[in-house]
Amino acid sequence: MHGPPGLSPTEHLLLGLTRLGQAVRLTAWHNGGPARLSPLQADILLYLAADARPRRQGEIVKALASTPPTVSDAMRALTSKGLVDRRRDPVDTRAVTLTLTDTGRAEADRLSVIPVPLREALDALSDADVAAMLRGTTTMIRVLQEHDAIPVSRTCVTCRFFRPDAHPQDPDRPHHCAFVDAPFGPGELRVDCADHEPADAGQGAAE
Ligand code: SF4
């Protein structure tokens, strides 16, 4: 990889990750669709779509590492666009819960289709590249979470059901998910799994 001279391989990697982050963010701005969604509004729709349970605003703030005023503004916009429904929480009537409307779900479906430039960039990777990058990414996410540098995400390496290298005799599918009781390979590590349950602190689900 070409880049500034004198950088170590890990610094080159960080530079590459930064460029990729910029590309993903730029693509999100260009993919606002008919509802003219900002990247944060799109992230909220995808977050709500990932799990059918009604969510509170505080959960969204935490999951997206944002702030209450920023998420409030985005929620107001999404509600006025008819994409999100606000209802009183039946358990705590002082709180409101948020769910997608049918139109919001359709928008989330549209957003979940990977735009062409990103799709082509991903298609350029071999299966081995994908597996290696997923492994590296989930490891970095775990360490960043341990430092409270990013919000906890629902990845295999922080999940109590994850059994890394439980099947050493099978190099294609060495890991095991105790939730579905099945082996899986490094290329199938999940980054946002609805069935994720956090491992106890110090349990060390991660590799
Ligand atoms: S439940 Fe989901 S996050 Fe947990 S180990 Fe299984 S696939 Fe991974």
Image: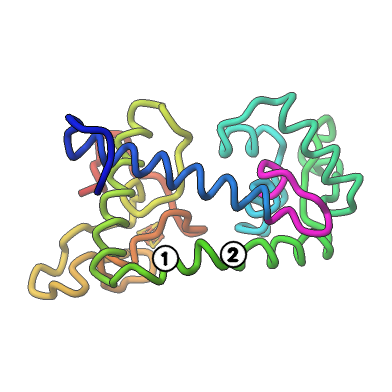
Q: Which quadrant of the picture is home to ligand 1?
A: bottom left
Q: Main secondary structure of the magenta part?
A: loop
The residue at 80%/41% (across/down) is 89
**Residue 11 rendering spot, x and y as whole percentages:** 25, 34
Q: Is residue 132 left or right of residue 198?
A: left
Amino acid type for the residue under numbered disc 2: Pro
Magenta-drawn segment:
31-42
Dots 1, 2 in contact, CB < 8 A: no
182 in relation to 108, above or below = below
**Residue 77 rendering spot, x and y as whole percentages:** 85, 41
Disc ID at residue 115: 2
The residue at 84%/35% (across/down) is 93
Q: Inspect the magenta stretch and tell me whether residue 37 lies in it.
A: yes
Other-residue count near label 1 (Cα within 10 Å), few / some / many at <14 / 14–19 / ≥20: few
Q: State the residue position of label 1.
A: 122
Q: Nearer the N terminus, badge 1 or badge 2?
A: 2
Q: Inspect the magenta stretch and tell me whether residue 133 lies in it.
A: no
Amino acid type for the residue under numbered disc 1: Leu
Q: Is residue 85 left or right of residue 199?
A: right
Other-residue count near label 2 (Cα within 10 Å), few / some / many at <14 / 14–19 / ≥20: some
The residue at 29%/56% (across/down) is 133
- The quarter of the picture where residue 115 lies is bottom right
Q: Is residue 88 left or right of residue 33?
A: right
Q: Nearer the viewer, residue 148 or 166?
A: 148
**Residue 90 rendering spot, x and y as whole percentages:** 81, 44
Q: Nearer the viewer, residue 50 or 42?
A: 42
